Amino acid sequence: MTAPQRSGFEVATESLRTVATKWEEQGVQMGSIVPIVEGVRFNGVEAGDYTHYFLPSYLAFTDMVLARCKEAQLEMQTIGSALRKIAYIYEQEEHQNIHSMKNLY
């Protein structure tokens, strides 16, 4: 029986890190939407006399968009961090197992 090859393991942890980076980058993109939405909010003066017809719904909508973008940014960062932690733990456990199984093959 031949010893398992480490190269397959390294590919898996690097893939986890690559996916983590994508989550983090997309989180930054979600965060970049926040100032844009804040910039297009009406304060009531811009809408003129007809403000009372649509402003409450419009403000509720923009508040919801802002909240979801901020939430997405935080959660995407959390997912990226979790994937990096998983890759680190895999590597640590593999390192420990290699030492405990030395000379078995």
Image (cartoon, rainbow, N blue to C red):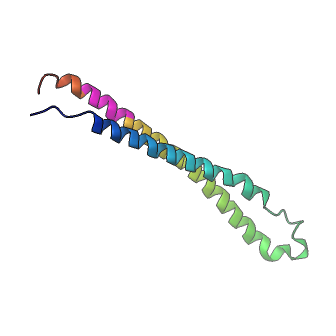
The residue that appears at 28% across and 39% down in the rendered structure is: 8
Please say if 2 is above or below 71. above
Q: Residue 89 falls in which quadrant of the image?
A: top left
- Name which residue lies at 22% across and 26% down: 98
User: Is residue 105 inside the magenta stretch?
Assistant: no
Magenta span covers which residues? 88-96
Q: Residue at x 73, y 56 (%)?
A: 36
Q: Position of residue 95 (x, y in %)?
A: 28, 26
Front-most of 68 and 12?
12
Magenta-colored segment: predominant secondary structure:
helix
Task: Please say whether residue 89 is one of the residues in the magenta stretch.
Answer: yes
Front position in the image: 101 or 85: 101
x%, y% of residue 42? 82, 64
Q: Name the residue at 43% across, 40% down.
A: 17
Q: Is residue 34 above or below residue 43?
A: above
Q: Is residue 51 above or below residue 25?
A: below
User: Residue 37: which quarter of the image?
Assistant: bottom right
